[in-house]
Image: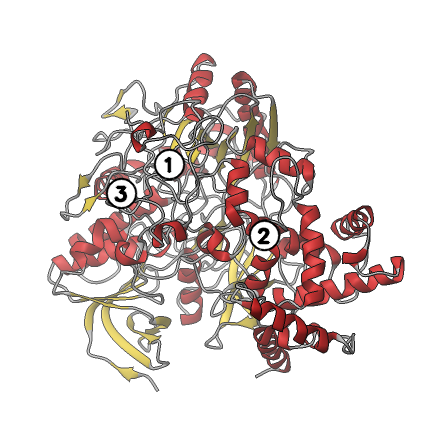
Amino acid sequence: MSESRSRRNFLKSAAALGAAVPAGVAAQSKPAPHADHDKQHAQHMRAAAASARPYMFLSQAEVAFLDAAVSHLIPKDELGPGAKEAGVTYFIDQQLFGGYGTMAKKYTQGPWPEGTPQQGYQSPLTPAAVYRAGIRDTNEYCKKTYSKTFDALTRAQQDEVLKGLDGGKIELEQVRSQFFFNMLLNNTVEGFFADPVYGGNRDKAGWKLVGFPGVAAVYTPFIEKHNVPYKAQPVSIADITGKVAQVDEHGHPIHVMLDDNGHPLSSRAQRGTS
Amino acid sequence: MATKLKPVDVVTIGVGLTGTILAKELADTGLKVVGIERGRWRDTDPDFAMPGVHDELKYVRDKELMQDLSKETITFRNAMSDTALPMRQLGSFLPGEGVGGAAVHWGGLTWRFLPWDFETKSQTLARYGANQVSDECTMQDWGVTYKELEPHFNRFEYLYGVSGKAGNLQGKIIPGGNPFEGVRSQEYPNPPLKTAYSSAMFKQAVEKMGYKPFPVPTAANSRAYKNEYGATIQACVYCGYCQFFACEMGAKASPQTAVLPALMKSPNYELRTLCNVVKINLDSDKKRAVSVTYVDSRGREFEQPADLILLTSYVLNNTRLMLLSGIGKPYDPASNTGVVGRNYAYQTPSSVTCFFEDKNFNSFMGAGGLGVAIDEFNGDNFDHSGLGFIGGGFIQAGSNGARPIEIRPVPQGTPRWGGEWKKAVSKYFNRNFSITIQGACQSYRGNYLDLDPTYRDAYGLPLLRMTFDRRENETKMSVWLTNKAAEIAKAIGPSKMNVNPRTGKYTIVPYQSTHNTGGTVMGADPATSVVNKYLQSWDVHNLFVVGAGNFPQNGGYNPTGTVGALTYQALEAIKTKYLKKPGALV
C-alpha cells in the first residue's frame, strides 16, 4: 500500500470517527487549533444527545458557523423558511457523517495533483475533511480580519466573507476557498430540497417554496391539463412508510389537492380525474 | 490461482441491454449461456419499489444505480499534452452497474440513426468535398447501411415496445411522423405518449415556421404492451422520476421488463452476479479466445472457458478489456495507426431555457423522452455548404420530470444564492421549460482511449484513459443549432431565455449525457476498425464486441435504438453464419 493510500485510509477513518476527532487532525496540515475544542465538543455532544436529532459529525462551533452561513445562502424571508430553519445544518451533519462525507463509491487513490477545472474533484480531502478545514480556515480569516469568528459577525460582514469565498478573493490555507464554498452551496441546496428523511427540508419548506409535490402520484390524468397548476400537499417517503399518506395499488401517494389559498380541498374526489 | 470451470458454449461479459438479448436468443437455440455481471441482481420488485425509488438525493446525487468508482473509474484529460487524472466522482456521463446496466436508469429515447449517419464519410466527401472537415477528423463509414439494419431496428422497437409515430412507412411520408427518418417497414408498436404543455407550445411554433414536428420515440410505453417474449411492459404514469431512476411501474423498457423475465426461466442460461471479468484469455497463436477470467465477490478467481465470447459491457469497459487482454492493436494517435481505442466520440448537447411569468408547466411531471421534436437540422438534412461543419442534431421540447436538487433553472444574471436566487427559483420552478438539442460529435485523431500509466483499479489493473475534447466542427455546429432553437424560442415568446450553446473545453464535471461512443469501432477495413460489419473481432473470430463502442462517430440522436439494432445485426450473423461455420465472417 502506498504512503498516500495509507494517509487516505487514515483520513477516512478520521472522518468516520466524526466529531470525536479534533478538527485539526482530520484537516491534517496544521497543529490542533483550540485547546478548548475538545471540552466544548464534549458539552455539545451531551447537549445533542439530549435532543431527538443529535449531531454526529459537526462540533458546536461548526454548527454555529453553518447555521450562520446557510442562512445567507437561502435566507428566511416573506416567501418562507430559509435553509437554517429547514434543518440544512443538520442535513449536512448527517451527510458528512455518512457515505457522502467519506467519499463512498468515489475513487480515492492518489496521486492528487490539483488538475484542471475540466478534470473535476481532485482533492485528497474527503468532503468531511473539506468542511473541517474550510470552517476552521474561514474562522481564522474572520478572527484576523474582524477579531471574531464567522458566526459572531454582523450579517453584512458575513455576507462579505461568503462573497469573498465564492469569488475566490479570500485565500484559505488548507482548501481552495471556491472549492469549499461550492461544496457548501451544493449541500445547502441539497439539504433544502432532498426528501425530509435526510433531516433537511423540514416541514417540506423547500418543496413548498417551489411547488414540488415530492413523491409523485400517477399524473396520467393531469399531464395534458395544460397551464393548470397542480397544487398538492407534498408527500415525503416517511409519509408513506409511516402511513400518513394514502397510496394507490402501485404505492403512489394519493395527493391531497390544495385550493388557491393553500388549504386542502375537502374531498379526494376533488383531485379530479379526466 | 484461478479455478478452471466446466466449459460452456457462450459467455456474455456484462448483463445489460445487449447481453440480455444475445443471451436469450442464443440460449433459445440450445446453447449453454453464462452471463457474467460485475454488479448485483436488481429487479422492479423489490429494488425499484415505491416509495423509496422517488428519492432524488439517493438516485441523482449519490447515483445509486451507477458505477462504483471506488473500484474502477477512468482517467481523463482534454489533450495529449495534459496529464490525465482520475474521474473521482461521476458527472458528465453515468455508466450503470448491476443487472440491466445503464438500461435501468436510461431516459428511454429510442431513435434510429439516419441513413446518412452510417455513411458519414462517403456522403460528406461526395456532397461537400474533403475541405468540409479538418484533416484531423477521422470520420468513417460504418461498413453497414441503414437498409441492412432496418429489420433490426424494427425488431428492437417491438421488443422494447417503443411509443412513437412513423414518418416514412415503406417509402410513404406519413403526416405527424418524422419525414427525415429512413424508410421503415412497420409503424411503432405503441402510439405516442401524451403531449406536455411545453411540447404543445413548441409544436405550434415550429409548425408556423414550416417545420415538421413529431413525437419523440421513447421506450416509456404509452400503454401496457406484451412483447415477443411474453413480457408485459406497463403503461407510463408520467411520474417524472425516469432518467437516473429505475421505473417502479415497469413501464420504461429495460432488460428487467422486456427480456429477463423470459431469460431467467431458460434452462440454458446461468447468471453470475458480483463477478468482474478482468481478462479475456487467448490461445497461443492469439487467434481464438478460450476463456474469461473473473473475480467474484469473495475474491475468488475463476476461469470460464467458452466457445463464443460476447463483450457486452459498457462502451468504456469494452475497450478496456480489449486493451487489458491484448486483443487488437492499440491505437497510436502519433502515427494514426492501430485500432483499439480509436475514434472515441461523445455528444454535443445544448439548450435554450424559456422562462414565463404567467404560464405553469407542472415541470415535475413527465417521462423519459416525453417530447416533440424536429429533425430539419440533423445529420445532412440541411445544406452545410459554407457552414464550416458537418452533422447536426434533433431539437425538442418536452417534460422529463424536474426535481429541485437537479433541475431548477433561473434566468441568466440571477445570483447563485441569497434572497434573489430564492425568489427566482420559487417563481420559475414550474414556469420554465427547455428546448434541447442532441448535437452530434465527430471523431478526431487526438480523441482516443488507452490505458493509464499511473492510476489503477481495485485489482491493480490500469484504468482506462480518456483523451477528449470537442473541436471547431462541434462548436460551430452547436452555436448554429442553438441559434435555430433560440429562433423557435422567440416565436414561442418567453419573458426571458437562457441560450446555452456548447462551447469551450469539454469538462467532465457537469452531466451531459451517457452517450460515449467509439473505441471498438466497426468498419469494412481492419486498419481502421476493431470489428467487422457483424461486430466480430478482426483478430479473434470467436469474440463479438457489441455496443455504442462500435459507432465510428456519434450522430445527433441518443444512441440506444442504434445499439439495439447492432445487437440484432451481430445476433443474426452469429445464428445464421457463425454457428454453422465458426471462423472469420469477412
Q: CA distance from mark 2 to mark 1?
A: 39 Å
Mark 1, Cα crowd under 10 Å, few <14 / some 14-19 / many 20+, is many
> Label 3 belongs to which residue?
A248
Amino acid type assigned to the residue bearing label 2 in the image = Val
Mark 2, Cα crowd under 10 Å, few <14 / some 14-19 / many 20+, is some
Residue B429, visible in the rendered structure: yes
Vertical position of residue A128 compared to residue B492: above or below: below
Q: Earlier in the sequence, mark 1 or mark 3?
A: 3
Q: Is residue A210 left or right of residue A247?
A: right
Q: Which mark is residue A256?
A: 1
Which residue occupies the foreground of this view, A38 or B82? A38
Vertical position of residue A62 compared to residue B534: above or below: below
Name the element at disc 3: loop
Percent position (x, y) of residue B178? 34, 25
Q: Which mark lies nearer to you, 2 or 1?
A: 1
Name the element at disc 2: loop
The residue positioned 33% from the left and 55% from the top of the image is B546
Amino acid type assigned to the residue bearing label 3 in the image = Asp
> Label 2 belongs to which residue?
B509
Marks 2 and 3 on same chain? no
Percent position (x, y) of residue B132? 56, 33
Percent position (x, y) of residue B83? 65, 63
Residue B580, visible in the rendered structure: no
Which residue occupies the foreground of this view, A44 or B410? A44
Q: Which chain's residue wears label 1?
A: A
Q: Is residue A217 left or right of residue B449?
A: left
Which quadrant of the view contains residue B309?
Answer: bottom left
